[in-house]
Structures are given as structure tokens and as C-alpha cells.
Image: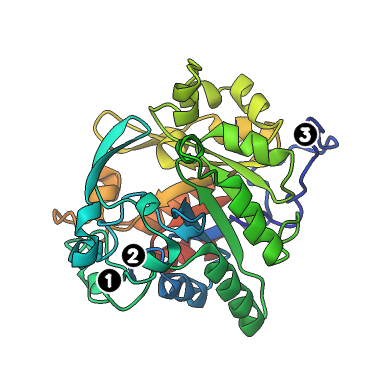
Amino acid sequence: MSLSSDVAMVRAPGQRRAPRLRPAHSLVVTPAVVAHRGASGYRPEHTLEAYRTAIRMGVDDIELDLVCTADGVLLARHDVELSLTTDVADHREYADRHRTLTIDGVEQRGWFVTDFTHAEVKRLTARERRPAARPHSAAHDGRYGVPTLNEVLAMVEAESVRRGRMVGVMLELKHASWFDSIGLGLAEPLLRDLARHGVDHARSRVSVMSFEPTILRTLAGCAKVPLIQLLDAGSVPADFVAANDPRTYADLVTPAGLAWIERYADGLGVHVDLVLARTPGGMLGEPTSLVRDAHAEWLTVHTWTLRAENATLPVDLRIGADPHTHGDLPGLARRLLDAGVDGLITDHPDLVFPALSERT
């Protein structure tokens, strides 16, 4: 996520911002549109083409998840298991690496990035995660490779120069405590790649996110980019489980929890349901106090993930009965903007822009 220049200041650990007038709505002048895994509604996720497609659409930022190879290279992938979004299962030379692994308490079976070197992953090509819902994206299966963070940062720099505007990058560290437990910590390769591209500073338009507070608290002492605490609905941070910490995400969205987050982070990335609670019937409810409470701590709020397909939308925003048909995604974006969010993280940036343009 990119934070607007007037709120992207990074503090030393424990340092508070100077008092300012509390805003009535968003903390930023213009809320950001962020491409989730690139324009993943149109191209296979986490490919350079998905990111470029989003940048052509005019997004403020691209969002990418990071996992680590056996030789310590950060890749743009959401899953540690590779078969959901690559052709790894078609490579006979890797058949013997198919195994079962437990990650953050969840048993999975497949091919895992930690069993592959960077060079071996570069032999794979990307596939659409949801081919039934997105056949137009699945038509691009096999055309694009799996990029490294280094390659994405280089592409963003080139696209920013080409288009005469800075494109932001939101980096999500996946399964940070689990990677630490197997000796493949994410902090060191992250800082290495940020330094390599000269973007480890507060105005670089790069920010780092995680669902796990521990890695963000570690980075607060050494990284200079804004840090974003991700919050889910109805679950527990994996690092808290590992440390026998009884707190849940529900504890972190309280005023006391947000005050604790403010000590190390600059913003939040939250599930849509934490901003607009669903009714028992699955319809869109009224805004919660989360945005107001977060803004009281001068934490920005981005919300995820806005997808156009009916199956992902509240009941009252669906159009027709087909779960794969696009519903009223602009309507959801309008309601979130009305609730005062500072950014919208979406698979379909082009469908979100109209809601934003109505407000300018």
C-alpha cells in the first residue's frame, strides 16, 4: 500500500506523532486503489503481467505476497504450496518432492517452495487460481513465470519512469514465524532487496505488511518503510499461537489493541467485514467503529479484498444467481469509502475506480 505523502511518516519505536486535528473521514486526501496480487481478476496472480496490467489501469499501488525459496530468495507467491498457481505438478523431474507439510497448524499436501531453489522455481509457469470463475485469466496459463521480489521492484521502477508517476508497492510477508522456525527468516532477504533498490526509506512508496505482529515489531527497529498490521475476522495470529499468547484479532481491533499496534505500525489492512459487518442474512451491515478508532490512533485503514464475482459479495450486492457473474463491486467500494477507509485492495481495480471518481 502506498501511504499518502502526508501520512507516510515513520516513527522510531515508541515515538508518537505530534497532535493534529482529527479528520472527519479518510486520513488521506484521495483513498488509494491497490491491485491485489496485481490485476488478478484478469491475469494469473503474482505475475509481472498481472502487475503491469494493474499499472496500466492506473492503480496507486500493487500488492504482493512474499515467500522464500530453499536458497533464501523471496518470491511473489501467496502460498507456500506451489500447485495451486503454477504448473509444478506437470514437471516429472519434481515428482519426488510431493509431500505433506504442516504450516501454522494446517496440514497440506503438495509441492512446497521451501523444497526448491530459486533456479528450479524459474522453470515453472503461473496458472490461474480460480479457472472456473476466471476463464479469461486461465487462458493465459503457461505464459508467465514466477517473479522474485527483486524482479518486481525493478519492473515497478521502470514502469514508474515510463508513466511519469510513482507506483507504490505493498509487500506482505507470509507465514513469517513458520519461516523463522525452519531457518529461512524473511526479514534479512527483505531488507537486502529493499536496500538493493534504494527503497528502504519512508518516502519510497513501499510498505511492508503481515498478519503476524512479531515480524513487524522486529522490522520496526531496523526498517524505514511504513509498516502495516493486517487484521482478519474471527481468527488468531499464527505467531501468537506459537508463543501461547491468548490474544486474537478481535483483541487487536479494540481501542486498547489499536493503541498497542500504533507503537510499531503506521496503518492497518483489514478484512471488509471488520469495517462493514454482515447481517445474519449475509447482507451488508452498518459501519463498525474500527475506522474511527484506528484514525484516532493515526493508523491508516486499507480494506481487503474487493472481488467482483457474486460469490464473494454481500447478498444485497449480487446480480443474478450465477456465483461467477460480476455483481455490484462499485457499490461495495462506495460503502467502504463512505465509512472513511484510506485504501481499497481489489482484484478488479477498473471496477473500483468509478466509485472513487464520484468523490473527486
- Asked if residue 341 can be seen in this view, the reply is no
Q: Give the side of residue 148 with respect to residue 123, left or right.
A: right
**Mark closest to the chain's N terminus, 2 or 1:** 2
* Secondary structure at numbered mark 2: loop
Colour scheme of the rendered structure: rainbow
Instruction: Give the Cα distance between marks 3 and 1.
Output: 43 Å
Residue 285 seen anywhere in this rendered image of the structure: yes
Tell whether label 1 touches label 2 (CB within 8 Å).
Answer: yes
Pointer 3: what residue? 13
Residue shown at the point (54%, 25%) measured from the top left: 252
Which element is circle 3 on? Answer: loop
Tell me the residue that label 1 is attached to: 137
* Label 3 or label 1, whichever comes before in sequence order: 3
The three-letter code of the residue at mark 1 reads: Ser
Q: At label 3, which amino acid type do we have?
A: Pro
Write down the quadrant of residue 90 in the picture: bottom left
Mark 2 is surrounded, within 10 Å at the Cα level, by few (under 14), some (14 to 19) or many (20 or more) other residues, namely many
Q: Considering the numbered disc 1 on the image, is that residue within a helix, a strand or a loop?
A: helix
Q: Which residue reaches farthest right? A: 18
Q: Which of labels 3 and 2 is toward the front?
A: 3
Rendered position, 351 above or below 242: below
Q: Amino acid at mark 2?
A: Gly
Numbered-mark total: 3
Q: Mark 3 or 2 closer to N-term?
A: 3
Q: Nearer the viewer, residue 151 or 279?
A: 151
In the picture shown, does residue 329 fall above or below 237? below
For disc 3, the neighbor class at 10 Å (few under 14, some 14 to 19, many from 20) is some
Mark on residue 162? none
Q: Residue at x 56, y 22 (%)?
A: 254
Of the pair 201 and 72, the residue shown nearer to us: 72
